[in-house]
Image (cartoon, rainbow, N blue to C red):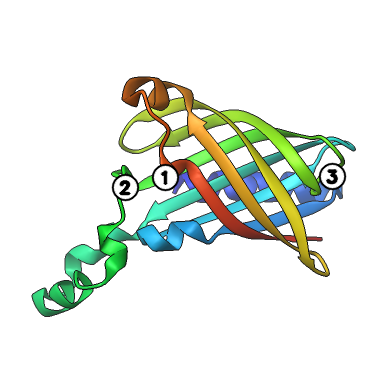
């Protein structure tokens, strides 16, 4: 509920500001049975802000039958290593774009709240590239500073591959 409220407020601010906006979907999260959606807007030539929310769809799996659970366990995506023990998360960040907003390399800094670990500061980098008429692809690596210092290793869970519609 908090995520939806955050996304609604963020969308309202974007509409009121008439800024260049984006809506993105994290495709890599689908491998982990998650849904992550992001909304962003252009602040200036090199700066943008975004907010995202995600839910771990495995919590919905509690209500399926044993036969469906056994069938589902035979697929290789269940063998992927994952530290994703949260049920939902919310993220807000500021991005600095080297070339221009929604094009090329960017650096990001922000905060994330996860249901399993609470609040954490995020730092990351990424690359956005055009696919077709306003549709862009993204490759992002961002990680929680506290979470990474505790585990003392980089995690593939922090790598995100997605698509983004810019309008």
Q: Nearer the viewer, residue 154 or 119?
A: 154
Residue 33: numbered disc: none
Please give the residue where the numbered disc 3 appears in the rendered image. Answer: 17
Residue 71: percent from the left, percent from the top? 18, 78
Picture residue at 52% right of the left edge, 61% below the top: 27
Q: Is residue 131 left or right of residue 30?
A: right
Give neighbour class at mark 1: few <14, some 14-19, many 20+ (Cα, 10 Å): some
Which numbered circle lies on residue 157?
1
Question: Picture coordinates of residue 133 (x, y %)?
Answer: 83, 69
Regarding residue 35, the answer to whether it shows in the image is: no
**Residue 82 badge:** 2
Q: Using the numbered discs, state the Cα–Cα distance from disc 3 to disc 2 in whole angstroms.
A: 38 Å
Q: Earlier in the sequence, mark 1 or mark 2?
A: 2
Q: Residues within 10 Å of mark 2 (few under 14, many from 20)?
A: few
Residue at image point 38% right, 47% down: 88
Secondary structure of the residue carrying tag 2 is loop
Position above or below: 113 against 7: above
Q: Quadrant of residue 111?
A: top right
**Which circle's residue, 1 or 3, is located before the other in the chain?**
3
Disc 3 is placed on an element classified as: helix
Point out the image quarter for the C terminus.
Answer: bottom right
């Amino acid at each position: 509920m908090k995520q939806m409220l955050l996304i609604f407020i963020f969308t309202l601010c974007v509409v009121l500001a008439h800024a260049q906006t984006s809506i993105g979907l994290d495709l890599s999260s689908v491998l982990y049975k998650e849904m992550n959606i992001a909304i962003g807007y252009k602040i200036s030539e090199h700066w943008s802000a975004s907010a995202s929310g995600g839910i771990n769809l495995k919590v919905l799996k509690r209500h399926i039958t044993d036969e469906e659970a056994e069938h589902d366990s035979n697929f290789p995506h269940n063998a992927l290593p994952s530290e994703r023990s949260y049920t939902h998360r919310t993220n807000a960040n500021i991005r600095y774009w080297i070339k221009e907003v929604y094009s090329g390399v960017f650096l990001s800094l922000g905060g994330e709240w996860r249901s399993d670990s609470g609040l954490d500061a995020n730092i990351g980098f990424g690359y956005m590239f055009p696919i077709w008429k306003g549709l862009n692809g993204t490759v992002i690596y961002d990680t929680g500073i506290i979470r990474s210092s505790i585990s003392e290793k980089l995690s593939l869970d922090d790598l995100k591959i997605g698509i983004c519609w810019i309008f």
